Image (tube, rainbow, N blue to C red):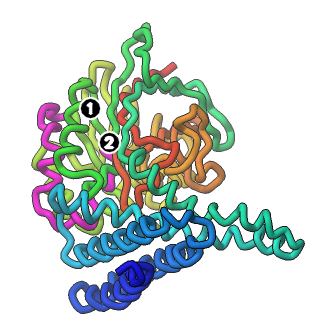
Amino acid sequence: MIDALPWIFPTLTLVTLVTIPLYAGLRRGRFYSIFSAIVLGLTALGAGLVYFRMADYVPAAALPWLQVAFALGMLSTAAHYASLVNARMRGRAFRGLISIPGQVFLAAGFMSTFWLLALLIPRALLWAFGANTLLGWLAPLDLLPYAVAFVAAFTSPRLSPELVRLKLGTARPENFSRVPMERHRRKKPEPLAERPLRVVQIADPHLGPWQPVARLQRIVAELVAREPDLILLTGDFLTMESNATAGALAEALSPLRELPGRCFAVFGNHDHEAPDEVKAGLSANGVRLLNDDSCAAETPTGPVQIVGADYVSKGRGEHLTQLLADHPRIEGHRRLLLLHDPSAFHDLPDDAVDLVLSGHTHGGQMGLVSFGFNWTVLAHSRWPDHGHFARGSNHLYVHRGTGFYGFPLRVGVPGEASMLELSWD
């Protein structure tokens, strides 16, 4: 048995790479078969390279335990991907023993492939200069993606309760810029002199293995208990599992029934995979869907016009221009726009709204937000990652997300459970 141990993981990997795409193709179709083959292949490549090099730097006593861990990781990954062929929400035992460890192992192997490619350059330079000692010191870095994935499994589901204050109307930068804001995480600040508009945003809850019904229901109930004037939901409610579980979203959002007339939503990109289920879940809880629509809501601070943009991937500028022309500003109303993807903010006509509320980026997922810095891996991309931005009189707030999809890779960027206090000059 001990002699066979090193070959269990390679055998399981080979069986997984052959059987899961084949099974997926026969039962679910070509797209999922190709998707699973690509993801599992990239994971297996990185995991395999790490696995066969471990004996060079892992102590002999620890090596069998790591070999067992890799075998169990691949087994749970295979079982999770097989379960997605007939996707549905699963019980706690399945999530804890299969889906969560499988997705953690998948994330680690996937990262390993690209991490090892990046390490090729310093390793080639050290080999060229004959620095064999330094090459040996670099070897344990192979395991860094596994350490990151392990830590992320505990940090990713965590939400940070916050009070965020945005002042609108003052900053009018000519070019798109980050705008200062107040973010209070531990100590509640003194009340503002004038009552602000109090808004709760729910973004990217992604009901699924990491966000079961009971957990999302509890999060929503805690947000409702903060008594906001408005609850605005900016899309991506489901995952592959919850797409096919009728009634799951309706149950998870049930605390919203306590705030009739105050809850409004738009679709994100994933919501077009199961539009009827999302519509049913929102409708069951009195949430008004504003896909390319608008409405006026009365609040303690005065009337607010809420415009909702459906998610589109092409022609976004024309789409937003037409939407805002069809729903012009109402005199005497504050004007908010729900827009799932914040990169579409760049396509927004000048001086169109007071504030855009977006999600989609999950805050950048990896960065230094937990340490008080704004930097994330998306900091210099076309996607505004998190926080407050402006261009002219158009302001944007990007929520870090109520959940995440698939890989548990929130590191240094916690999810968000915030109350927004909006004030105007």
Q: Secondary structure at mark 2?
A: strand
Residue 4, percent across and down?
39, 84
The residue pinned by badge 2 equals 202
In magenta stretch: residue 218: no
Residue 23, percent across and down?
26, 88
> Residue at left 22%, top 34%?
262
Q: Are marks 1 and 2 in contact (CB under 8 Å)?
A: yes
Type of amino acid under label 1: Leu
Residue 304, percent across and down?
33, 31
> Residue at left 40%, top 15%?
188
Q: Is residue 179 above or below residue 114?
A: above
Decide which of 376, 196 is in the foreground and name it. Answer: 376
Alpha carbon distance from label 1 to label 2: 9 Å
In the rendered structure, find residue 38 and report the number of the disc placed on it.
none
The residue pinned by badge 1 equals 223
Decide which of 194, 50 is in the foreground and name it. Answer: 50
Residue 141, percent across and down?
63, 61
Relative to 206, 318 lies left or right: right
> Residue at left 54%, top 27%?
181
Type of amino acid under label 2: Ile
Relative to 144, 414 lies left or right: left
Q: Is residue 191 above or below residue 214?
A: above
Image quarter of residue 119: bottom right
> What range of the chain is rendered magenta?
233-261
Task: Say whether residue 35 is visible.
Answer: no
> Residue at left 14%, top 55%?
248
Q: Earlier in the sequence, mark 1 or mark 2?
A: 2
Image quarter of residue 72: bottom left
Q: Residues within 10 Å of mark 1 (few under 14, many from 20)?
A: many
Q: Quadrant of the N terminus?
A: bottom left
Task: Say whether residue 103 is visible.
Answer: yes
Image quarter of residue 269: bottom left
